Image (cartoon, grey):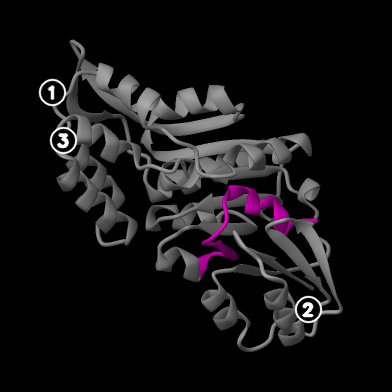
Amino acid sequence: MNLIIQGLEVANHDLRELAKLAGASQIERITSEAFRLKNASQREHIAEYCADAELDFAFVENSMPLGDFGLVAMDMDSTLLAIESIDEIADMHGVKPQVSDITLRTMRGEIVFAESLRLRTALLQGLDQNALQQVYDERVRLSPGAEKMLQRMQSVGLRTMVISGGFTFFTDRIRKKLGFDYAAANTLEILEGKLTGKVLGEIIGAQGKADILKRVREELGLKREQVIAIGDGANDLKMLEEAGVSIAYHAKPIVQEKATYSINHVGLDGVVNLFG
């Protein structure tokens, strides 16, 4: 088993101390921010040490090459993107504090997602549809390392998918920009150029995300073990359960508790460093 250590700044003395704690036989450089401690053992104090040093760590089986996977699925807001798109739309309508509060409570698992989305979308009633394009042009930012991660995964043949409890206005554009194979999200109702405050069709929430991932996985003829899923909020938990490897990215504690691995300090490109 290998211990992968990642951080924005990884000091040599931290690597040596962690290698000693884990009984590792060798320290191997992956990138300037990522190192592989070979033949490591899961021992006490490693998690505590990494938390104090602001380092990400993951114990990974030696035989996990990225090319053995067939699909990576990820959440959009606060995962692929460094924003919550609905919060930014709300800011255009002067209701961001109200919407952000509901978003936060939802991500912590305090409100069922479908009800949360209805409440937040209702607050957007009357907003001009041009505000959506303005949010996309002016405020959408990819999370650090997102493009590098996707390029690496696509280069070894993985199919890529973004599944969002947000809106198709954004997933459609992001799919085209980044070359995703699949995209799924909710559709805003727009009449006479204005948002009605309603969502069309069945809301894609926690179970919807899981169902979409499972359907695509089966269409591709993949086993659960061949799927990687990445998310950050309680709404992603069921989706993460449908993957062989689940990754909590800068996520809420409830997600970190359930995920296979957690990344709290480096960008999304840290995901590919977990695999040989």
Label 1 secondary element: loop
Q: Position of residue 185 (x, y in %)?
A: 41, 34
Location of mark 3 (residue): 122
Instruction: Indicate left or right for 257 with 195 as reference.
Output: right
Region rendered in magenta:
258-276
Q: Amino acid at mark 3?
A: Ala
- Disc 1 crowd rating (10 Å Cα; few below 14, some 14-19, many 20+) is some
Q: Say whether residue 265 is magenta.
A: yes
- Disc 2 crowd rating (10 Å Cα; few below 14, some 14-19, many 20+) is many
Label 3 secondary element: helix
Above or below 245: residue 89: above
Quarter the N terminus occupies: bottom right
Separation (CA) of disc 3 from disc 1 = 9 Å
Location of mark 2 (residue): 40
Residue 218 makes an appearance in the image: no
Q: From the viewer's perspective, is the residue at label 3 or at label 2 nearer? A: 2
Q: Say whether residue 4 is magenta.
A: no
Please tell me which of labels 2 and 1 falls first in the chain: 2
In the picture, residue 62 is in which quadrant?
Answer: bottom right
Location of mark 1 (residue): 126
Q: Position of residue 178 (x, y in %)?
A: 58, 28
